Amino acid sequence: MFEFQADLQAIYEEMVAWRRYLHQNPELSFHEYRTAEFIVNHLQSWDIEVRQGVGGGGVVGLLRGSEEGPTVALRADMDALPIQDEKKCAYASLTKGVMHACGHDAHTSTLLGIAKVASMHRSQLKGNLVFLFQHAEEITPGGADSMIQDGALEGVDAVFGVHLWTPFPVGHVYSKAGPLMAAPDEFTIQIQGKGGHGGLPHQTIDSIYVASQLVVNLQSIVSRQVDPTEPCVVSIGSFHGGTSFNVIAETSVLNGTVRTFNAELRQDVKQRIERVVQSTCDMFGATYDIDYKMGYPTVVNDVNETQRFFKVGASLFGAEATHESPLIMAGEDFSYYLHQRPGCYMFVGAGNAEAGIIYPHHHPKFDIDEKSMLNAANLLLGMALDYMA
């Protein structure tokens, strides 16, 4: 196999330029048209075989090595979020109300850098590399499952992915065997009461009061009904009810999320939420409607491929900078790839407090230490080449 670190270092500034262009020109999930075109043009310029519109909006590149060997897939997501960019920098988003607030612009640029370097060494490649540029990770249903259904993993033996992660410091890498990221489910509960005059509450069924009781009662699921050794979150993220100070609201709507790692617990919590809602509404004479959406499955890393991460990470960054990750309650549709093929999802530190890069993902001032892209490229390509060795 070939040495790649010097070559990645040589194109680092180019990777930064790609990332800043994409950061200025973000596109929402299922609308990544210019981003996909940008990717396709670069892949084709390096004589990499390209499939477009995979699963609806994804791009798949195939680099065939000169010798027989395994096929390894590397994945990057490319969609942005409906958030107004509040950063004051030269590469801030030029699209009102849309920004790369999670690092997908950097993921895409990292994978493009890997593709360019690998294409320079195809004569030394013992096997094939597949580059998965995935659309719509930020929204359910995401793009991973549809890309798989459209053959994105056909012939692939293993799959690897990274997430640049600002809660972790730049220069450090993290992963964990088995469950790593939670299954993120979403629910919307509409409470139907009986509206009326604010001064005559006895003639009404106050939907805001019922919904308020429900917010409190739902917290008992985690605190009193779930084994405390099992990670679980039930959170209400929005509460809407009423339009006037002197009118008792007839309808209120709650929107929330459930995060679990255990598949049985995931179903159990869903049923418990339905029972709590029914009981609370019955108590006050209200009716309800629940829309419960099951999100992505839990991200579960292959044990052997996670061992490979610790070996490759230590060789690249040192054992002191290669860590077992804590459980992450965020969700990721990379889980679909891992349900189909052995692989490993990894976190690459992208935070830098000294440089003011301290804002969390999905924050209007989110940014990354761009050196993390070089680290991510080394890690991903190192994983692939170690598998192919």
Image (spheres, helix red, strand yellow):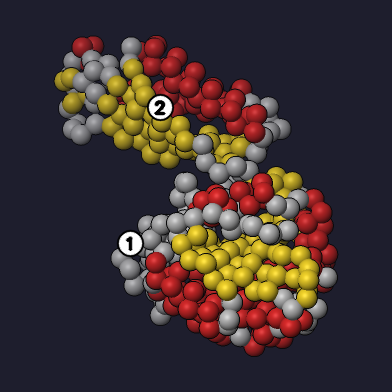
Task: Measuring from the top left, give residue 349's x and y in whole percent.
Answer: 64, 65
Task: Measuring from the top left, give residue 53's x and y in whole percent.
Answer: 46, 62
Query: In terms of depth relative to the viewer, which is nearer, 183 or 202?
Result: 183
Task: Measuring from the top left, give residue 113's x and y in whole percent.
Answer: 60, 78
Task: Measuring from the top left, give residue 67's x and y in whole percent.
Answer: 78, 76
Q: Which residue is mark 1?
A: 97
Q: Residue at x 49, y 55 (%)?
A: 55
Q: Secondary structure at mark 2?
A: strand
Which amino acid does the dot numbered 2 rest on?
Ile
Q: Quadrant of residue 346?
A: bottom right
Whether residue 283 is situated above or below residue 231 in the rendered picture: above
Judge from the rendering whether residue 223 lies leftward or rightward of residue 204; answer left or right: right
Assess disc 1: are there few (<14), some (14-19) or many (≥20) residues with their C-alpha within 10 Å of its C-alpha. Answer: some
Decide which of tag 2 and tag 1 comes sooner along the chain: 1
Judge from the rendering whether residue 60 lies leftward or rightward of residue 139; answer left or right: right
Question: Which corner quadrant holds the C terminus?
Answer: bottom right
Which amino acid does the dot numbered 1 rest on?
Gly
Query: Mark 2 or mark 1, which is nearer to you?
Result: 2
Instruction: Say if residue 280 shows up in the picture.
Output: yes
Residue farthest toward the bottom in the current orientation of the protein: 10
Q: Residue at x 50, y 82 (%)?
A: 17
Instruction: Say if residue 180 shows up in the picture.
Output: no
Assess disc 2: are there few (<14), some (14-19) or many (≥20) residues with their C-alpha within 10 Å of its C-alpha. Answer: some
Q: Which residue is mark 2?
A: 290
